[in-house]
Image (cartoon, rainbow, N blue to C red):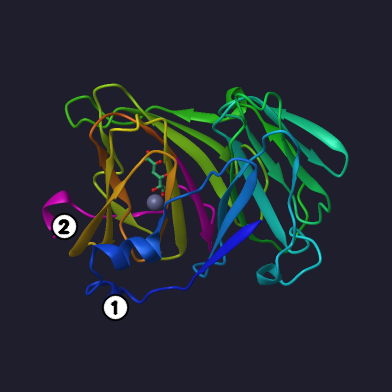
Amino acid sequence: MKIDVRHASHPEAVRGYDTETLRRHFLIETVFAGGEIRLTYSHYDRMVIGGAMPLGEGLPLGAPKEIGQETFLAERELGALNIGGAGRVVVDGRSHELQKYDCLYIGKGARDVRFESTDAADPAKFYLVSTPAHEAHPTVLLTRDRARHLTPGEAATANRRSIYQFIHPEVCQSCQLTMGFTMIDAGSVWNTMPAHTHDRRMEAYLYFDLEADQRVFHFMGEPQQTRHMLVASEQAIISPPWSIHSGAGTKNYSFIWAMAGDNKSFTDMDHIAIADLR
Ligand SMILES: O=C[C@H](O)[C@@H](O)CC(=O)C(=O)O
Ligand SMILES: [Zn+2]
């Protein structure tokens, strides 16, 4: 298991970052590696972001020194959303089957967590997001049909999409984690435009379901100091709480969003008029 630590950047410092520096701090280029668990520990709200891609044998979730506990979930909660082939997550001996687009919430205190693929030739890819937790909530399997489904956006503004809310107060209890995914309709390209910030919550995105030769222009930065990163499929971005987070693809795509911070209110956003962006 590999874990990469990312410290937090001050917005005034980010104004001077060049492309390589922006990518080193805010882009996770390799989320999924065959037969491995790879994690990134962000100091924004201590969110851990990563991927488990089991091949032949199951992958146990260890507790690296960075976590500071004997078990990974001693003082944390975890969301695992499968974007690959069928697989299972075994939590303290209980097996949960996840097809593509299913999500498992694992509550604080689970001791033994392991990830398995049904077929090593079509491996599961579990995208993982973990945040500190103060209370034990039940572990819940959230199949796609259990998610809260919204269909915002319009073809004229190229942002018709489906939002699936899984770890969300109306669907599943959690301490501070919220998580789900958004699928952009064919012919639409934009997510989250008009853009917003929510300084009380940070956010991370995993872009996926995009062809290898296509990219998403991911926009970040203070609203009047925007920057962008070119992001490929199955790469993740860390969005600081003060930053906008919005993307336009060269084609439609999907992305998993996850947030942590002072509230779990998905609609608590400070919108920025498109004309005010710089
Ligand atoms: O605060 C919420 C996040 O930015 C995203 O979840 C927005 C999103 O999925 C969408 O508009 O499609
Ligand atoms: Zn947001």
Would you identify the image quadrant in which residue 145 lies?
top right
Q: Residues within 10 Å of mark 2 (few under 14, many from 20)?
A: some
Q: Is residue 273 magenta?
A: yes
Instruction: Look at label 1 and name its amino acid.
Output: Ala
Q: Residue at x 51, y 48 (%)?
A: 31
Mark 1 vs 2: CB contact within 8 A: no
Q: Quadrant of ligand 1?
A: top left
Q: Could you give the CA–CA distance between mark 1 and mark 2, rounded to whole angstroms?
A: 19 Å
Q: Residue at x 38, y 61 (%)?
A: 26
Is residue 139 visible from the viewing direction of this image?
A: no
Q: Which mark is residue 13?
A: 1
Task: Pinpoint residue 49: horizontal percent, then vertical percent.
Answer: 55, 54
Instruction: Look at label 2 and name its amino acid.
Output: Leu
Left or right: 121, with 73 as reference point? left
Left or right: 65, with 156 as reference point? right
Which segment is the magenta one? 256-278
- Tag 1 secondary structure: helix
Left or right: 216, with 51 as reference point? left
Q: Is residue 208 magenta?
A: no
Q: Which residue is mark 2?
A: 277
Would you identify the image quadrant in which residue 46 lies?
bottom right
- Image height check: is 213 above or below 132? above
- Tag 2 secondary structure: loop
Task: Pinpoint residue 16: horizontal percent, then vertical percent.
Answer: 22, 75
Q: Nearer the viewer, residue 268 or 113?
A: 113
Q: Residue at x 66, y 56 (%)?
A: 1
Q: Which mark is residue 98?
A: none
